[in-house]
Amino acid sequence: MRAVRRPQGALQLDRRDPPRLARTGLLPGPDRGAGGVGARQRLRRDHRQDQEPAVRHARHPRPPAVQRDQVRAARRRQPRGEGVPQQAARPGGARPAPQQPFRRPFDVGRPLPAPPVAIEPLRIATVDDPRVRDFSVISDPALMREGGLFVAEGRLAVERLLASRFATRAVLLTESLLARLEPALSACVSDDGGPHVYLADSAQLRQITGFRFHRGCLALGARPAPPRDAGDLPVAVARPLVALEGVSNPDNVGSIFRSAAAFGAAAVLLSPTCADPLYRKSIRTSMGTTLTLPFQVAEEWPGALGRLKTSGARVVALTPEPSATDLETFVRRSDGAPLALLFGNEGDGVSRAALDLCDERVRIDIDPAVDSLNVATAAAIVLQRLRAR
């Protein structure tokens, strides 16, 4: 027998030695009938063979002999049939047939999506470039209105402008924001190649706009056509319409648009004396919702309220008058009819002529020491309570 020297403290690896004791000295060579088993595999089995047989079989049960024989039979070469070796039956039953992957049937009537259009931005060399001249008057509302334009500032507002019903004429931005806006720019490319995209650095943006601008991008949008009849505004049963009279602060207008969009209003109707919802401050305060929520500036006021009533809406005015219906009472007895909620300015409230056209007057219950609420806050409270009914 060939002798193998065993290091000090090594385990006995001879499988013919049941006690598996650790001894020093010479170690008999491996059993010739054990097959080509490496030392690493023998060591991996040592901890099981050191145990008593009953413990070893309880912790590491072997499969039944029937299953083992079937597996061995499956491995033997079987007689060929139709040129393919036959295989024994699977011990656990027949293998389930593989499922074919789901494939959506080709829809002949549905057009394929258009591939994205590559944007080719133009880098301006000087701030006097005539192609960006319109961006130099964005701080003058009168000139912007005369030119039929409005401006959206910041990435979020520009993205909502690109996805809105308004046409985008040009975009001026820094190179760092180009990658973030490129998907939205590619999706709104028109047949004439617009919108035009211009690149500038932060210093050039400040010189072009005339003020310290830190948002990194601006976009010029085209103002819509003259307003239609107020009866064309959407009047829905589950979504109230918001009407504003004399709300001249663009911050309040933008905040009301934001609340109206958040609480599911259908549209906004503005009197001619309201602040422009497309003014840059209104767009910025509304987080771009003035570009996504339908609105209309009425040419005739308060006659537009009468046309809303003709369309089937129930006009409700918010007023601090003590005789008005409490808001909670109004919400409880609301029957789901289409509503038009009228809010006035903070100084004068809703005018007498508009109140005479309303179907009901509602007030918000507040502390008697406070005369009224901010109009944007009042609108948010009423819209939220109606949504939660």
Image (cartoon, rainbow, N blue to C red):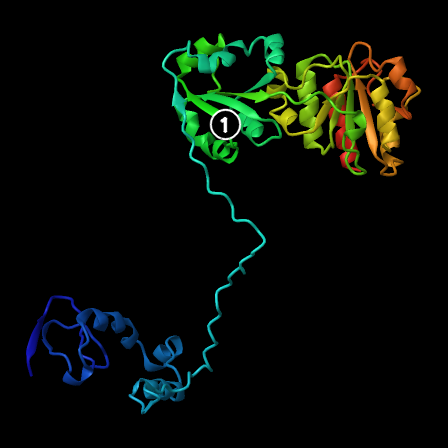
Residue tagged 1: 194
Furthest residue in direction left, as rendered: 2
Residue ID at (43%, 21%): 198
Furthest residue in direction front, as rendered: 192
In this view of the protein, can residue 16 be seen by the observer? no
* Residue 258 in picture, x, y percent from top left: 67, 26
In this view of the protein, can residue 187 be seen by the observer? yes
Residue type marked 1: Gly
* Residue 74 in picture, x, y percent from top left: 34, 86
* Residue 1 in picture, x, y percent from top left: 7, 83
Q: As drawn, is 278 to the left or to the right of 369?
A: left
Residue ID at (82%, 16%): 301
Q: As drawn, is 17 to the left or to the right of 290?
A: left
Q: Nearer the viewer, residue 321 or 130?
A: 130
Q: Quadrant of the C terminus?
A: top right
Furthest residue in direction bottom, as rendered: 79
Q: Nearer the viewer, residue 228 or 347?
A: 228
Residue ID at (14%, 79%): 30
Mark 1, other Cα within 10 Å: few <14 / some 14–19 / many ≥20: some
* Residue 129 in picture, x, y percent from top left: 42, 12
Residue ID at (68%, 31%): 262
